[in-house]
Amino acid sequence: MRYVALIMIEVIILPFGCVHGEADQGIQRAAHVFLSTTPDDQRIVTGLWLMHKIDSGMANGLVIVDSRTEAEYACGHIPGAIHIPFKAAAEEENLARLPKGRLIVLVCKSGHTASMLNAILNMLGYQAVTLKDGMKGWGEVKSK
């Protein structure tokens, strides 16, 4: 997860609109806080944990965000999930849909792009976690 965050910062965030100086320092501070406060579970939850929350009615405090494509989302998604495509996740109107005071569970196909989104949202002040193994992991839990 930390490796993904560093690559994301270098490849995605820094080339787009950042000039050396104050903007770089702000990103560096946010990245440092994110990496230095990452818990041992690396902000990851399992499909079993999420299923228990949903089945027991304790998912009301969660916001489940599916970041796959529209077609993938339409083919099936976790109950209650909202769709915010990965490529549009940082758009102002999509960020406005996410409450900062609730836990956001990020879902993608395998967990990879959700992990990148996890890093971005946490650096922006949201409380986000990634569903381990994404929809693949969810499917394995649901088939049991």
Image (cartoon, grey):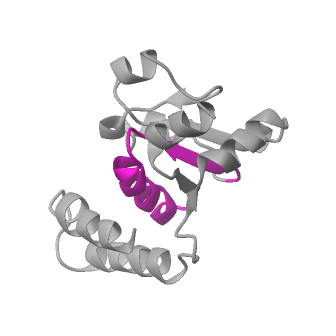
Q: Position of residue 109 (x, y in %)?
A: 38, 38
Residue 126 appears in the figure: no
Where, quadrant-wise, is the C terminus in this rendering?
A: top right
Residue 14 appears in the figure: yes
Judge left or right: residue 49 versus residue 31.
right
Q: Position of residue 71 (x, y in %)?
A: 34, 18
- Picture quadrant of residue 3: bottom left
- Picture quadrant of residue 24: bottom left
3 up-or-down from 47: above or below: below
**Closer to us: 139 or 54:** 139
**Closer to us: 9 or 7:** 7
Q: Residue at x 37, y 23 (%)?
A: 72
**Closer to us: 30 or 53:** 53
Q: Is residue 116 magenta?
A: yes
Label tally: 0
Where, quadrant-wise, is the N terminus in this rendering?
A: bottom left
Q: Is residue 30 magenta?
A: no
Which stretch is magenta? 101-127
138 up-or-down from 102: above or below: above
- Picture quadrant of residue 18: bottom left
Q: Residue at x 36, y 56 (%)?
A: 116
Q: Position of residue 95 (x, y in %)?
A: 49, 42
142 up-or-down from 122: above or below: above
